[in-house]
Image: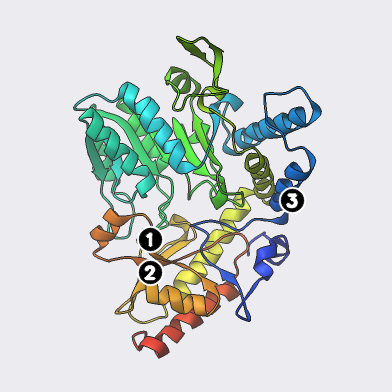
Amino acid sequence: MTKLNVEQIRKDFPILKRQVEGKQLVYLDNAATSQKPKVVIDALTEYYEGYNANIHRGIHTLAEEATDAYESVRETVRAFIDAEHTHEIIFTSGTTEAINLVANSWGNANILPGDEIVLTAMEHHSNLIPWQRLATERSAKLVFIPITEDGQLDMAEAKKLITDKTKIVAVTQMSNVFGTINPVKELAQLAHARGAVILVDGAQGVPHVKTSVRDLDVDFLAFSMHKMLGPTGVGILYGKTELLNAMPPFQSGGHMITTVSREKASWAELPWKFEAGTRNIADVIASGKAIEYLSALGMENVREHEIEITKYALEKLSELGDITIFGPKDATLRGGVIAFNVDAIHAHDIGQICADAAIAVRAGHHCCQPLMRDLNVMGTARASFYIYNTKEEVDLLFEALKEADKVLGHVAVR
């Protein structure tokens, strides 16, 4: 039995009280974005009502309070992912910008013609397209680790594909389609043994799995706060000090400099070298509250709840006839993401029928078009869970899918 008091947790999320056309909202689209507890919402209000000012640029009270609140979040993030230094924490607009920062800054400085960039066949577009562009610009080669029938990485092939030609391995920590939790630590060992670095897309993993960058020994980790109870518009890039110091700035302008003449400029120290211009101050401050909330729950407990509800959902949905569930069958091998298709019913139709029942799920290709082609599907429906979801909500999803049978006549319950 999970140690989380889910009913108490639900009281912290105002939006979960919402009715949709007279029906109680069931929010199962957490892989796209999570809901926000009141403590996060209040932090935004408190900043704008109490100490709204730009940071690092003033000695008046409001500026000092804003700067202190903003910079304190860097330590909160450092502790949460077990980084060694606060200057290894870079604030970005999201996972996408963080990966683009590495691809443009580290990539342009290190990738040469003929070098290989190793990805996996399950990558989100955000961890594919930046490397496609870099490979084209630098005449490098993309190499893809294949997946097994149950949606896990083929590690035997990974050992063959990561070679002396490999310069970087870029891999998702958790698939946003399969829910697969990838063996990042083993991949890091394989990369480092060949003199390569590793970047981890933690957008799906960090919100759900306790993550230590030192234990995993990853070189870069990117994730987004809006998927872990925080506001939109804030991402984190972690990078090892020696790598970040050697990288040129990604963006140029105010704040990321120390001295400027009309002919040249010198760059600020880490982390500010990579934080040009006015940052998303309010949302960074609120993001700190989101991390504090998760830390108070305990990430081990978050994971335990996720396994419990995912196991239940896998068993319940499997009672439907003609359903295909993608990814590992073992809930301990995956996160709370279940992508599925029901024979002869379009994923968007499933999404609409669920929406009519006030159940929010996702339908489409989930920014993984190459993977959808591998699966020979146009898209899938996807239910994704978080700390406030219940087994009763899974039951409501099951009932909505049975309703699809009545409407479209294709779902048979065993």
**38 w.r.t. 216: above or below:** below
**Dot 3 surroundings within 10 Å: few (below 14), some, or many (20 or more)?**
few
**16 w.r.t. 128: above or below:** below
Is 109 on the left or on the right of 69, as rendered?
A: left
**366 w.r.t. 67: above or below:** below
Residue positioned 67% across, 59% down in the render: 3
Question: Which secondary structure, mark 3?
Answer: helix
Residue 340 shows which numbered tag? 2
2 or 3: mark nearer the eye? 3
Q: Residue furthest front?
A: 262
2 or 1: mark nearer the eye? 2
Is 278 on the left or on the right of 252, as rendered?
A: right
**2 or 3: tag closer to the N-terminus:** 3
Tell me where residue 183 appears, x and y as whole percent: 40, 44
Question: Which secondary structure, mark 1?
Answer: loop
Give 22 or 176, whichever is nearer the viewer.
22
CB within 8 Å, label 2 to label 1: no
The residue wearing badge 1 is 328
The residue wearing badge 3 is 42
Tell me where residue 413 appears, x and y as whole percent: 40, 86
Q: How many marks?
A: 3
Is 242 on the left or on the right of 6, as rendered?
A: left
Figure quadrant of residue 272: top right
What is the three-letter code of the residue carrying label 3?
A: Asp
What is the three-letter code of the residue carrying label 1?
A: Pro
